[in-house]
Image (tube, helix red, strand yellow):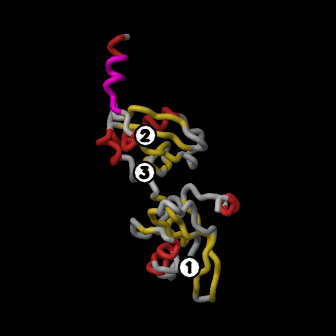
Amino acid sequence: MEKTKKYVKSRKYLKEATVIVNVENVIEVRAEDIIKAVTEQCGHGKILVLRPRRGKEYGLTMEKEMCHTVIDGLRIKGVDCEVKNLQNRDYVVSFMHLPIYWDDNKIKKKKKLEGWGVDPITKIKIRQYLGTDIEDGTKFLNVRFPKEAASLLYSTRLETAEGPQYFRVMHSHQVNPCRLCMSL
């Protein structure tokens, strides 16, 4: 008994070594499933704490040098799950079902992301239908929000070959626009 207490006391629990695992797309996920996935990806004994959070999120604290091994994502029960740092302003932003010919550079230009005050931090990727190499037109990338921004607009107007059209914009931890207006 004394040996266990001594071991636990020597652990370092750092907020910099804590990530948030989003399991919203995994059906009937349990803590054991997450532990198994992390162990397969990082090795045995690297997890210090796994705690449920609000919704379908878990806080995962690891040995500090191991956090980078899961930050690009974690595959749980065959489903890719988003992982982000605890103190992070980085989010995945998706532009839903754009015409495939629409220029990616226009997403990053002043009228879109930069105009909204967010900085792109990865290249734009195109989502594919599960199990195929067929794209659905959804373009997504990681961006960094400024401290004063809580959310982006739910849709945006883009010029297409058929004229102006509105497209849905989604991002992780999106805030309801009504709540956003109330906080202003």
Magenta segment includes 126: no
How far apart, in angstroms, are the residues tagged by discs 2 and 3? 11 Å
Q: Mark 1 points at which residue?
A: 99
Q: Is mark 3 on a helix, strand or loop?
A: loop
The C terminus, quarter of image: bottom right
In the picture, the disc for residue 114 is none
Whichever of labels 3 and 1 marks the residue nearer the N terminus, that label is 3
Magenta segment includes 7: yes
In the picture, the disc for residue 37 is 2
Q: Dot 1: few (<14), some (14–19), or many (≥20) neighbours within 10 Å? A: some
Q: In this view, does 10 lie above or below 148?
A: above
Q: In this view, does 103 lie above or below 14?
A: below
Q: Dot 2: few (<14), some (14–19), or many (≥20) neighbours within 10 Å? A: some
Q: Residue flagged by tag 2: what amino acid is it?
A: Ala
Identify the residue at the far top of this view: 1
Q: Specify the principal SS of the magenta part.
A: helix
Q: Nearer the viewer, residue 166 or 130?
A: 166
Q: What stretch is highlighted in magenta?
A: 5-12
